[in-house]
Structures are given as structure tokens and as C-alpha cells.
Amino acid sequence: MTLHTVIFIGRSGSGKGTQADLLKDRFHRLDSARHILYIETGARFREFIRGGSLSAKRAKEINDEGSLQPDFLAAWMWGSALIEELEPDMHLVFDGAPRAESEARLLTTALGFYGRKNVTVIHIKVSRRWSEDRLLARGRADDTSLQKVDKRLDWFDKKVVPAIEYFKSDPFYKVIEVNGEQPIEKVHADIIAAYEYKK
């Protein structure tokens, strides 16, 4: 099986994690001998801010304010995972990174450094209203009010959309856009159909 490198990107609440899990399961069924490095920056941030270091405490303050973490810290989250955990024969799946064009450009240098090829970006497209409803319904600690949710969705429009446009403009990446406002199984089927075609 080909060595896969996939980046899931989309609004908060779009189902990136669910779809990443389904694709990982597919890779595992088709190629059980290879491990998958799954880098989910949101979970890494939540674990990081429970620490006692100066950086962790400052990141927790930023999180509690409902503000956006700095790009350098976001890049360190996935960069340290690559440095410490990536092995030569692993599939690689990113969930929720990068979150800005500057971060996307850094990621390009990292993927080039590791000789990764045929990198696919899967953009799960959902409306702002869809995201609001899902985030408020799941009731996670950082989704407790419409004000906090709207702040995060504003960041997507301001920071993440330019990253998606960067991916589209760079032939190093293959970009797939899928309608996320469908049942989970249909979104997965659309991803697989487009992924196999693009690959």
C-alpha cells in the first residue's frame, strides 16, 4: 500500500476527528502492518495546558480568555510530534492543523524534510450555522457560549481560509472538498471516492 499523508481541515464542529478516525480505520484494514501517526493538535493543546510550565500556564490563560494560541505554539505541537514520533514507514494523518497560512508554509517545509509525497488535504465544508449548532450541542469546556464559539469561527474565516487557499495554490498538495452537512457515512463515502480518484 502507498504511504499516505493526509491533512483534515474544516470549521470546528465539522466532524474532522470522526472522519479522520474512519479513514485511519480504512488504512489499518488495508495495510495492518504499518502504523499511523495521528496528530490532533486540539487534544495536544488541551493536554499541554494542564502542565505546570510557564508556557503551559500562559497557554491556559489564553485558552481561558477564549483567545487564539500563537502560531509558533501550534507549529510546535505538530512539529514536536513529527520529531519525536514519526518513523520511516508510517502513514501520517493531521487533524486540525495547520490553522494559519504561516503554519501551512512551515508544514510544507516539514513534509519536504521527511520526503512525504502525494499529500492530500481534505476540507470538510460546513456552514457557520452548522458549526455553531454542533459546538453548542457537544458542550465541551471551550464551547460553553455562543460568544466563545463565534470567536473560534471568526478565526477560521480570518486565519484558516487563507491556509486552504495556499494549499490549493501549491501543486505539492491535492485538495479534496467534501460536503460535511450529511450523515457521517455519506461524508466518509464521498471522501473515499474523491480520495481514491485524486490519489
Image (spheres, rainbow, N blue to C red):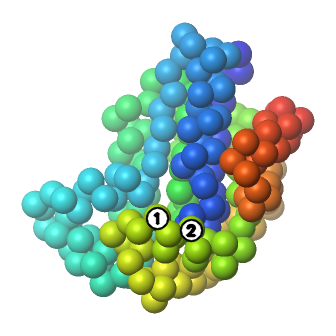
Which of the two residues, 148 or 105, is positioned nearer the viewer here? 148
Q: Residue at x 56, y 38 (%)?
A: 21
As drawn, the residue found furthest toward the right would be 197
- Which dot marks residue 64? none
User: Cα distance, mark 2 to mark 1?
Assistant: 6 Å
| Residue that carries the numbered disc 2 in the rendered image | 134
Is residue 122 in sight in this rendering?
Answer: yes
The type of residue carrying mark 1 is Arg
Vertical placement of 195 versus 62: above or below?
above
x, y (%) of residue 16?
A: 60, 53
For residue 55, which quarter of the picture?
A: bottom left
For residue 26, which quarter of the picture?
A: top right
Q: Quadrant of the C terminus?
A: top right
> Mark 2 falls on what kind of element?
helix
Q: Residue at x 33, y 58 (%)?
A: 45
Q: Residue at x 44, y 30 (%)?
A: 86
x, y (%) of residue 115?
A: 61, 32
| Residue that carries the numbered disc 1 in the rendered image | 138
Is residue 166 in sight in this rendering?
Answer: no
